[in-house]
Amino acid sequence: MAGTVVIGCADQSLAYELRSQLAEAADIEVVGVAETTTEMANLVLDREPNLVLVHDLLGPEPVHQVIRDLGLRRPASVAIVVTSDGDPESLASAMDAGARGVLAYPLSFADVQQRVNTALDWSRHMESLLISASSDGGSARGRATVVAVTGTKGGVGTTTLVTHLAWDVRRELPDHKVLVVDLDLEKGDVSSLIEARARTSVADLAKVAQDLSVRTVADAVFEHESGIHLLLPPDDVRDVEWVTPAAIRQIVGLLRQQYDLVLIDVGAHVTPVQAAVVEISDEVVSVVTPDLVSIRALRRTLGWWESLQVRKPDGVHVLINKASRTDEVQPETVKRLSPGPVLATVLPDMGHKLETAMNSRAPEMVTDPAWWRALRAFGREVGVVRRPTTTSDPASTDAAARPRRSGGRRQKAAASDETGSVAVELVALLPAILIVCAVLWQLGLTGLTYVWTGYGAAAAARSVALKESPAQVRAAALDAFPGSMRANVDVDVASPRQSSVDVSVRIPVVMPGVLNTPWTATISRDVVMEP
């Protein structure tokens, strides 16, 4: 089976030479050539090649940092660095970043063949290990799901959503390691919703970004009594300048190795740091409220991300928050106006029901089950939790089944409550529905009365033209009406020349022959005399 390769090289002559050498060195297919680090990262994540050949002069981001990030996100894609500088320091930097080999320029066919074949063997071995671990139900620990949550503007509920979702995941899955990262650097408010007193911040990690280790990152994280881990913004706004996109990439890369779920609140402002997080996250959620101001901000933000080539609109989940039936803009309208796919889950407007929990900095004080049900539905739709498919022992199965059954009873109770509220609303609307139906019925009956009167006038005019007696003229007119209406029909022939016939009838109420309205339907027809 042929291997696949992505080439990252802005020098076209070098890229052509690499393609020529690869065609002779191994059974391999070039699936893409990237001229920037961003384009290369997108190609690797989209095409999932066995091999990545990257020129050390590729930009705009540092090549070694991109290799390190791709190694964490796509372990089976092996990187080889092509360098014109063969000094030991460059070789050591490439190997520290996770590259499996270095090719010195000018290229040697024997060197290319050896490095490429070795890298392909390593890639296939890693792929088989990953597939085996997945089929055996191995833990996702070390490959955390990174979810970036952003707001279209202030006040849409981004921080509340992130903190409460982390709280609920930790409560439902105690064995999951959950981390909340507050990267709304200037106006971060996670510590206002979950009580935390951290001495270190993300800025402290960014200051030593070149010497980061797993232990360094772990020491900077604050563990809340609930089991949620928090990485908070700096208290001093002057430290924000230390937090750069390159530092954030390294920090998030190390966090992936330690947690099962990483939720990142990146605020509502498009900044270089926010763009970097949006680019490297597994899932991106943009929170909107059902109003045109928020929707305009959503379109603007997604347009900027696309122009920066960090995330296309179809790769962003749009979540509607604070929705109500009384809103002028309903979810259907948001779906038509949104440039990105809108999630089926809609979070309700909780009003003051979240106020106590926010003031107390304790999410567990939210007692409304509708809020937690909506959050779990949102989490399932986005895929924040990866559940291994393993066969458990009967004891654990029974233990897991008990809360599910009790949860089922709660869901049934909630469903019955909703059914009762729907019945009450239907009873309240019933009089209005009956009035509308009665008006429509009466309008239809009035129209039919005019149709019958027109037929009767036409029949009477024909009878007069045939010079029939007045009794015959009246009988011809009455034949056009239902039997219950004939007693109220008047036939008037103009005299003395008998030039027209007027037929009148009282308009009935509800149905013919029961009641009549004060109004009369009158139709006149001219008599055409035969020569």
Image: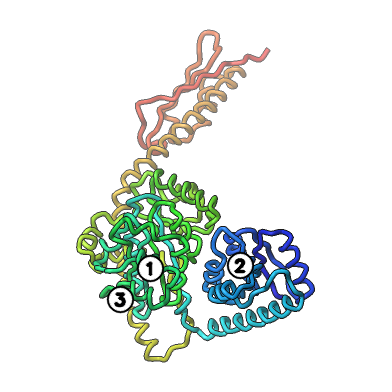
Q: How crowded is mark 1: few (under 14 residues within 10 Å), some or many (20 or more)?
A: many
Q: How far apart are marks 1 and 3 (CA)?
A: 22 Å
In the picture of the structure, the residue carrying the numbered disc 1 is: 205
Image quadrant where one finds the N terminus: bottom right
Instruction: Return the x and y of residue 362 as percentages of the image width and height.
Output: 23, 67
The reply to whether discs 2 and 3 touch (Cβ–Cβ < 8 Å) is: no
Tag 3 or tag 1, which sits nearer the N-term?
A: 1
In this picture the colour scheme is: rainbow
Between disc 2 and disc 3, the foreground one is 2
**Residue 500 sits above or below residue 222 on the image:** above
Instruction: Return the x and y of residue 365 as percentages of the image width and height.
Output: 23, 67
Q: In this view, does 331 lie to the left or right of 134?
A: left
Q: Is residue 131 left or right of residue 364?
A: right
Task: Assign a secondary structure to mark 1.
Answer: helix
Tag 2 or tag 1, which sits nearer the N-term?
A: 2
Residue name at image x 37 percent, y 73 percent = 178
Q: How far apart are marks 1 and 2 (CA)?
A: 28 Å
> Which amino acid, by three-letter code, is at mark 1?
Leu
Q: How far apart are marks 2 and 3 (CA)?
A: 35 Å
Image quadrant where one finds the C terminus: top right
Picture quadrant of residue 264: bottom left
Q: Which mark is residue 401?
A: none
In the picture of the structure, the residue carrying the numbered disc 3 is: 227
Extreme residue in the right direction: 24
> Which amino acid, by three-letter code, is at mark 2?
Val
> Which amino acid, by three-letter code, is at mark 3?
Gly
Task: Assign a secondary structure to mark 2.
Answer: helix
- Viewer can see residue 165: no
Residue name at image x 50 percent, y 12 percent = 494
Residue name at image x 37 percent, y 37 percent = 514
Q: Which of 124 and 198 is in front in this view?
A: 198
